[in-house]
């Protein structure tokens, strides 16, 4: 129903900034919320931030509050993740996801049924 394509990842030095983008296509009217997760090699996929599509309410993991910001452009069916003060431990594959309903909680991967292919973010020291 929904296809997601992430972009904007790359190599950045510690302390730098990146903006990730996720463009949605298909049945975008079914989107309740969009979110960003990340997964480092050998580790779990962790919630970073979510935004409701209709109201723009934002939710953040404690680990990124004050450094990352999620936003959306409903006209472009696109969600962004603005990342500042990047640290080497931020290195991971970053995934965009869509939740069709509010069930499951914003922090849980189980709440999301559509995922992008991921974009690599590497932060060097």
Image: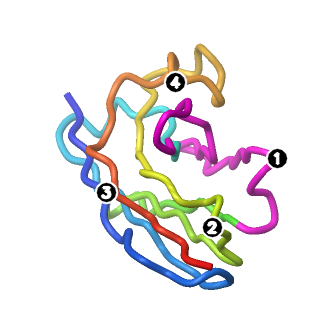
Is residue 48 one of those drawn in magenta? yes
Circle 4 residue: 109
C-alpha span from label 1 to label 3: 23 Å
First-in-chain label (4 vs 2): 2
Image x and y of residue 92, in percent = 49, 53
Q: Residue at x 65, y 64 (%)?
A: 69
Q: Is residue 45 above or below residue 117?
A: above
As measured in the structure, the alpha-carbon distance from the residue carrying label 4 to the one carrying label 3 is 17 Å
The CA span between labels 4 and 1 is: 17 Å
Q: CA distance from mark 2 to mark 3?
A: 21 Å
Q: Earlier in the sequence, mark 2 or mark 1?
A: 1
- Residue 43, percent across and down? 55, 33
Position of residue 61 in the picture relative to residue 9 (left or right): right
Which of these two is toward me, 87 or 52? 87
Which residue has dot 1 on it?
Answer: 62
Q: What element does badge 2 sit on?
A: helix
Q: CA distance from mark 2 to mark 1?
A: 17 Å
Whether 81 is drawn above or below 84: the answer is above
Dot 4 or dot 3, earlier in sequence: 3
Secondary structure of the residue carrying numbered label 4: helix
Along the line of sight, which residue is nearer the eye, 26 or 19?
19
Disc 2: CA contacts within 10 A as few (<14), some (14-19) or many (>=20): some
For mark 3, what is the residue? Answer: 6
């Amino acid at each position: 129903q929904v296809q997601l394509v992430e972009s904007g990842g790359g190599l950045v030095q510690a302390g730098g900034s990146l903006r990730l983008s996720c463009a949605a296509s298909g049945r975008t009217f079914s989107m309740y919320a969009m979110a960003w997760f990340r997964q480092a090699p050998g580790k779990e996929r962790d919630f970073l931030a979510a935004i409701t599509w209709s109201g723009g309410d934002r939710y953040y993991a404690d680990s990124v509050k004050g450094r990352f910001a999620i936003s959306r452009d409903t006209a472009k069916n696109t969600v962004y993740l603005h990342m500042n003060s990047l640290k080497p431990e931020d290195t991971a594959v970053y995934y965009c996801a869509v939740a069709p309903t509010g069930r499951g909680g914003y922090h849980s991967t189980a709440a999301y049924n559509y995922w992008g292919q991921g974009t690599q973010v590497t932060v060097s020291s």
